[in-house]
Image: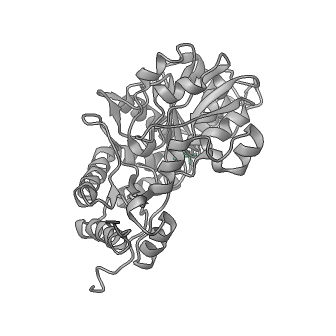
Amino acid sequence: MSNITSEPIPFHRPAYGEREIAAAADVLRSGWLTTGPRVLAFEEAFAERVGVRHALALNSGTAALHLALEGWGISAGDEVVIPAYTFTACGEVCAYVGARVALADVGEDYLLGPDQLGQVVTDATRAIMPVHFGGQAVAVEALKAIAPRARFLEDAAHALPADVDGIPTGRLGDAAAFSFYATKTMTTGGEGGMLVTDDDALAERAARMRLHGIDADAWNRYGAGGSWAYSVEAAGFKYNLTDVAAAIGLVQLDRLDELAEARASIAARYDAAIGGSGLADPPPRRKGDRHAWHLYVAALRLDALTLDRAEVIRRMASAGIGTSVHFIPLNLHPYYQRTFGYRPGDFPVAERLFQRAISLPIWPGMTDSQVDRVAETLLAICDGARRPVEV
Ligand SMILES: *Cc1c(COP(=O)(O)O)cnc(C)c1O
């Protein structure tokens, strides 16, 4: 191998350039750093892109999940259904409001489906959090029939832009949380999130709760023509986004389709290399629906191999290739075991998917030869560890 092809390939590299840097620098020079005109412009552009009445910019996707549950008045005695195959943010926000985390298994597509939901829904179920894992949107409509009285809160942290039958994420449920964390499909410079909804009452409550429970935001209070007076209506939170972050977000939002196309073409290249190899399976996806390709999770054919996923990751790392695992099912973590009584073995599909899963680098800017090198290295590692076939 030449020096050039042996250069390390990181698991992730953020896709921002001079436009984002210039937008942030403009805000720094303007003298107004925190929530202000850029946040307002970012919210308006985001609401228009998704096609919703309200978009509230926040400092994380987790804050968006929390404010939705809080705004719906979900509290002690209530249950919130979340898939076991997700990040802990989904569960911790239920705990914030005192609700019980009701974990559900997932289907072979990593997603919460009607069968899995039907097994855990009870009279106490107030909300359901479908997670658009990896960028494949959950068909929320099919879940509504199972729990017609519950609210649906989309965890859309992975899924921008994505859709089901042409309906974009953010409009599939009653509210949705997007994340602009550094590795997500667009970023506001490291941390950020957005709560979107058509629910006027929720939007009003969340707008207040994101800034100390105060009835007007800082811009109105301190800006030209603003008033010094404010009134505290509740014990709120400190969840507002800065104008510096929003300025970066506006540029990334403008580039969203360009970034999404880059991700989709990397996914297609991995598909072609890995599909049919007999050593690993490409991620499942529904034809016709838009996939955001936040993650490319290959599933190792462990029954054909003499090594496990941890060893594959170690060998990828020694070949200079960063990989990751999404996700360790929540029932395998001490907190969920201690607090809600979950145990290993509770969610067989999620746990089997987890054993096989390896997330490959997928970031705009990866070259074809980098993508090929990742796939070839993975397949070479697996090919060298084929389990002998008994005759
Ligand atoms: C990233 C992520 C979140 C949380 O987003 P933050 O902006 O980091 O708070 C929530 N759910 C899932 C599935 C995520 O991957």
Spot the residue most to the front.
391
> Which residue shows up at 50% across the image and 57% down it?
325
Counting every numbered tag in the picture gives 0
> Which residue shows up at 56% across the image and 20% down it?
151
**Residue 182 can be seen in this image:** no
Residue 328 location in percent, x, y? 57, 52
Say which quadrant the N terminus sits in.
bottom left
Q: Nearer the viewer, residue 241 or 281?
A: 281
**In terms of image quadrants, where is residue 36?**
top right
Q: Is residue 271 left or right of residue 339?
A: left
Quadrant of the displayed image that contains ligand 1: top right
> Which residue shows up at 42% across the image and 21% down it?
142
Q: Nearer the viewer, residue 10 or 288?
A: 288
Say which quadrant the C terminus sits in.
bottom left
303 vs 60: above or below: below
24 vs 199: above or below: below
43 vs 295: above or below: above
Q: Nearer the viewer, residue 39 or 76?
A: 76
Residue 308 location in percent, x, y? 48, 65
Spot the residue most to the bottom.
2
**In terms of image quadrants, where is residue 81?**
top right
**Residue 129 can be seen in this image:** yes
Q: Is residue 243 left or right of residue 67?
A: left
Spot the residue most to the top.
149
Q: Nearer the viewer, residue 332 or 128?
A: 332
> Which residue shows up at 55% across the image and 31% down it?
129
